[in-house]
Image (cartoon, helix red, strand yellow):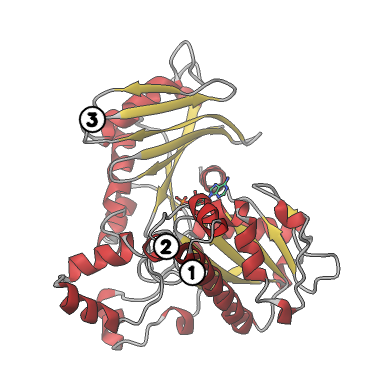
Amino acid sequence: MNVLVINCGSSSLKYQLIESASEAVLAKGLCERIGIDGRLVYQKAGLDKEITEAAMPTHKEAIQMVLDALHNPESGAVAKLSEIGAVGHRVVHGGEKFSSSVVLTEEVLKEIEACNDLAPLHNPANLIGIRACKELMPGVPMVGVFDTAFHQTMPKKAYLYGLPYEYYEKYKVRRYGFHGTSHSFVSKRLIQFLNLDAADSKVIVAHLGNGASISAVLNGECVDTSMGLTPLEGLVMGTRSGDIDPAIMEFIAKKENLDITGIMNVLNKKSGVEGLSGVSSDFRDLEKAYNEGNERAIAACEVFAYRVAKYIGSYVAAMNGVDAIAFTAGIGENTSFIREKILAYLGYLGITMDAEANKVRGEEKVISTPDSKVKVCVIPTNEELAICRETVALV
Ligand code: ADP
């Protein structure tokens, strides 16, 4: 079956058409600047990228352009649209309602809408994409795959904040976690790759991308993760602060004369390694500046790696041990000097890194030495493929 995987943001939309049996990507691309002007990037497997500038006032026009490109007689990936058997949609927040993927009925859409409060930037955009698809592809089954679902197995002690309990009861203020599709995919693949017994395994997944999070997976189930009510908690990220003393917010608000929106903007968009370094949020730029001796870039990289190492330590405590650790996403898969810095803190676990193996970029590899007590691997993530698999399983 051909599955169209859609990841819809407020002004952009990423897509892949995947043949589920072979798991081959038939075509992929993105729509950008939806509601501004509009730009479609389309690439059929084996061919060059095609770029089309065209008006996309809403997501509906964007999805229509994607569908047109997918069955265009010259470079289309399918002859007829009816060859698309199902659509898998990434949905950011499923609240406490959704602990697994689900077929998107009208009733389910209402329940997702009820979670909009929890992810006001993402969920409304996801819903617009789903509704536009339903309109343009009537009768084609659609599945929602939630970023939060994998983390719903966290125990209460891990998801409750030390806040008045009524905020949890009234507003569902608790830790949810994100990147769940990636944590699920990579933890399963790590267990398989190392031939571990899924029912008796302790693994930690470090998803280090522009947004970064880490999770503790005990016997195949998530027991803790670093992001919280929103993706702002936890690790130091590209432009997000991660954990801070909450009192800093009032302190800076007064000093800089900022309101709560201004403060949130600083924490989400002007902090992290970019805010620390003043160089960039991109680790390729940071590595260059680091090697040139830029002191703030050096500090940013040190803070980033130290925070990851501290979280790994806390998750070893949460699971009373660890069998294997996986690095994934842009930085985890590609940035060897950061992996080296993180692993340098973990000698007490009996981890020894294989320096030669750690040069790997973007492929599955064990990067610890054969005698390392804990296996450390690079496992590339593939959220689109995970969404495709979930979709096929449900339709
Ligand atoms: P997101 O999906 O959250 O936007 P990614 O997983 O794409 O993020 O990760 C982006 C980060 O990964 C950037 O900091 C970037 O520098 C780093 N990265 C991506 N590819 C490479 C690469 N080939 N070499 C080094 N770093 C890379």
Note whether ligand 1 is within 8 Å of mark 2. no
Task: Specify few, some or many for label 2: CA neighbours under 10 Å numbering under 14, 14-19, or 20 or more.
Answer: many
Q: Amino acid at mark 3?
A: Asp
Task: Specify few, some or many for label 3: CA neighbours under 10 Å numbering under 14, 14-19, or 20 or more.
Answer: few
Q: Which residue is mark 3?
A: 37
| In this rendering, position of residue 393 left or right of residue 296 | right
Which is more foreground, mark 3 or mark 1? Answer: 1
Q: Amino acid at mark 2?
A: Ser
Tell me the quadrant of the picture where the N terminus can be found. top right
Q: Amino acid at mark 1?
A: Ala
Nearest the camera: 49 or 104? 49
Q: Which residue is mark 2?
A: 277
Q: Residue at x 54, y 51 (%)?
A: 330
Nearest the camera: 289 or 110? 289
- Above/below status of 214 relative to 34: below
Which is more foreground, mark 2 or mark 3? Answer: 2
**Residues under labels 2 and 3: Cα distance?**
33 Å
Locate residue 109, reporting x and y percent: 31, 51
Nearest the camera: 190 or 198? 190
Locate residue 162, reporting x and y percent: 36, 87
Note whether ligand 1 is within 8 Å of mark 1. no
Task: Indicate which disc residue 299 carries.
Answer: 1
Locate residue 160, reporting x and y percent: 40, 82
